[in-house]
Image (cartoon, coloured by chain):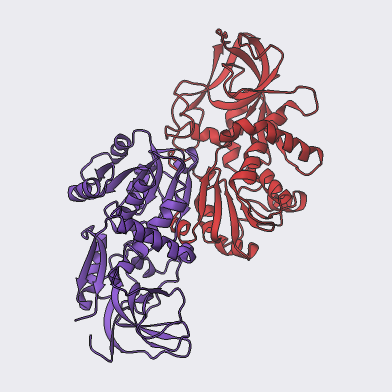
Chain colours: A purple, B red
Amino acid sequence: MNEGVNRQFYLHRRPTGRPTAEEVRRRDAPVPQPAEGQLLVRNYYLSLDPAIRGWMSAEPSYLPPIALGDPIRATTVGEVVESRHPDFAPGEFVVGLHAWEDYSLSDGTFLMKVPADGKYPLHYYLSILGAVGLTPYFAITETAEIRRPGETLLMSAAAGAVGSVGGQIAKILGCRVVGIAGSDEKCAWITEELGFDAAINYKTCGDLVKAIADACPEGVDIYFDNVGGAILDAALLNMVHGGRIVFCGAISAYNGDGKVPGPLNWWQVLARALTVRGYLVSDFFPRWPEGIAQMSRWLDEGRIRFREEIHRGFENTLEVFLELFDGANTGKLIMDIRED
Amino acid sequence: MNEGVNRQFYLHRRPTGRPTAEEVRRRDAPVPQPAEGQLLVRNYYLSLDPAIRGWMSAEPSYLPPIALGDPIRATTVGEVVESRHPDFAPGEFVVGLHAWEDYSLSDGTFLMKVPADGKYPLHYYLSILGAVGLTPYFAITETAEIRRPGETLLMSAAAGAVGSVGGQIAKILGCRVVGIAGSDEKCAWITEELGFDAAINYKTCGDLVKAIADACPEGVDIYFDNVGGAILDAALLNMVHGGRIVFCGAISAYNGDGKVPGPLNWWQVLARALTVRGYLVSDFFPRWPEGIAQMSRWLDEGRIRFREEIHRGFENTLEVFLELFDGANTGKLIMDIRED
C-alpha cells in the first residue's frame, strides 16, 4: 500500500459472462476525505463472494447495481483512520459494505464494530463471525423452519463457505444432512471432517435425481439452494409434500446475462405444496450480535469447522474472485490487502 | 343417457398441446358393478377444470397421471344408485373425484355427501360450494398470510372461477384487490359487479410491469398466481420486500409438453425475500365442511357472486373443456349430462 493513494478495482462495463479486466479495471484514486458525519476506513481484508457478480449486472436486486465507474462493492474489515462521526473513533475496527479499495468512506450505515482483542483474528469477521457464519445461521435456525428432529436437509455447494457451515448447524439442530459438492475430495471433507451424513459428487454420480433419491430415501424435507439450475431441478423431484426450499443463491447462473431463470420443474412447487423462501441475511441485521454470540460459542466448543483461503496481493483480486465460479476454492475467499 | 351403457371419454394418447379427439376418445363401456366395499355413482354434472389438462401429461404431479385407456378424471356430483359400502346408501348425493362418464365406482375415498334439500342446486357443489369456492377460500384465508388490512392482493385470471371468488374473499378480509383479466368486459365485471378495486386488461395495457405498478402504487403484497408465464414475471417485478405468492395454477403452460417452467424473473424471489407457496386445496380436505359453511353464509348474505356456465350434451365435453384455454368461458364450466 502506498500512503496517499487509494488503489481500486472499478466497474468499467457490465460483464455478460465472466468478468474480465476489460470490465473490472484497476485505477489509483486519491484517498477520500470524510465530510461531517462520515468516517474513513482503511481496509485490511476484502471479502470475495458470489453475490458481487450479481451486483455487476443491471438486473434489479436487493441492492442497486454497482454504478459504472464505481469501485466494486464488497464487505471489508478495516480500521477507522479518521472520523467525523460521533459513534466511531480512530483505531476502532469495523465491518461494512465497502469496496475493493484501500480506503472507504462510511456514514455508519450497516457498519458494525468488531473487537480487536485478539481472541479471534480480524478476518473471522468476514467469515465465520461474518456473513459466512450468519447467512447459514439465520437461514437454518429461522427460514428453513425445521419441524422435527431427523428431517433430511439437502445442501448444495456443500463444501462452499455457506454450505459447509450451514450443514454443520443443521446437524447441531438434529437434521440428517446430505451435501452435494463437485469433487470426491470435497465430499470426503464434508462427511469425514464436518460430519455430514452423506455426500453426492454431482459431477460423477450420473443421474442426479436418482443419486439424491438414494441418499435421501425418505425424501428431502429442506433443500438449501445456493446454486439454482440443474441441481435445483433435481432436488425438486425429491422433495416431500410440504417441503421447504431456502433460496439463498444461484451461483450456476451468475455469469449469464444477469437473468436467473426459474427451475424447469417449477410445477413441483405446486404439486408437492412446497414453500420457497427467498433469503437475505441483511433482513436479520438487527439480530447479528445474537448470531455472532451463538457462532462464537459453537466455535469455542469445537462444533463448527470452517476453512478460509486468504490470498495476498491486491492486484490479484479479480483473478482470485473468479475461482468462485470454477469451484476451485476450498474455503471462504478473503484478500489480505494490508502489505503489498 | 342409455341405461346399461356407460358413455366415457378416455385417454388414448398423451397430448403434447391442446388435446384433440385423437387423444381423448369416446367409447361406450358396460356399466360397472360395485364389489364389496364399493358403490356406484350415476354422474349428473361433470366439472371441467384446467387441472384436468395437467393430469393428461406424464409429468409427476400431486395426483398420478391419468393412465392410458382410463376415463378422463374429473370431479363430479351424482347420485348413489347402488351401494355395497356401509357409509353410503342409494338415493344419497355425493361429490367425488370420478371421470367423464355416466357411471363411476367409488370406494368412498375423498367422497363427500351433499344435501339434496333444494336449498342450493346440486351443481353448486362443483362450483361455489365445491372446489371453486374452497380453493380460493383456504388459499386466501390461510396460504396468503394476510398480515394487515389494506394489503394489496393482485389476482391473475381474475374473471375466472377461482380468481373471481378469491378476489371477493380477499375484499371481505380487508385487502385492496387488483385483478388481471383478458377483456374489457371481464375487467368491467370484476370491478363493477364484484367490487375489485382495479382491473388490468393484460391484452391491451401495453407494458404489463408498468400497468401493475400504476394499479398497485405501494407494490404487491400478495400475488395469487393462476397462470404462470409472463404475468407471473411481471408480478415479480412489483412485489414488496417480504411479499407472498400463492402458486395455485399455471394455466398459461398447460398445453405445452407437460413442463411448467419457472419464471424468468426467479431471482426476484431472493432479491425481495419473497415466500412462494404451492397450494393444493386437497391438503385442506378435512376442513372442507368449515369452508362450505363459511361460503354458504357469505352466499346467503349476498357477499359473494359467481357465474356458472352449464353446458348440456355429453358428446360436447371435450370441446367445451377447451374453452378454458381460450379464455372464452365466463364462469365455472360444468357439463350437465343427465338428459341426452
Is residue A50 visible in the rendered image? The answer is yes
Side (left or right) of A269 relative to B334 = left
The residue closer to the viewer here, B127 or A219, is A219
Is A225 rendered above or below residue B48? Answer: below
Residue A165 % position (x, y): 32, 55
Residue A174 picture quarter? top left
Residue shown at the point (38%, 69%) measured from the top left: A55
Q: Which of these two is toward me, A103 or B78?
A: A103
Residue A145 percent location from the top left of the image: 47, 47
Q: Nearer the viewer, residue A119 or A194?
A: A119
> With respect to residue B23, does A173 lie above or below?
below
Res B261 seen here: no
Q: Position of residue A279 (x, y in %)?
A: 45, 57
Q: Quadrant of the C terminus of chain A?
A: bottom left
B174 to the left or right of B145:
right
* Residue occupying image coordinates x 71% and y 53%: B174
Closer to the camera in the image, B231 or A280: A280
Q: Is residue A30 left or right of residue A264?
A: left
Q: Position of residue B220 (x, y in %)?
A: 59, 59
Please tell me in which quadrant of the rendered image residue B198 appears: bottom right
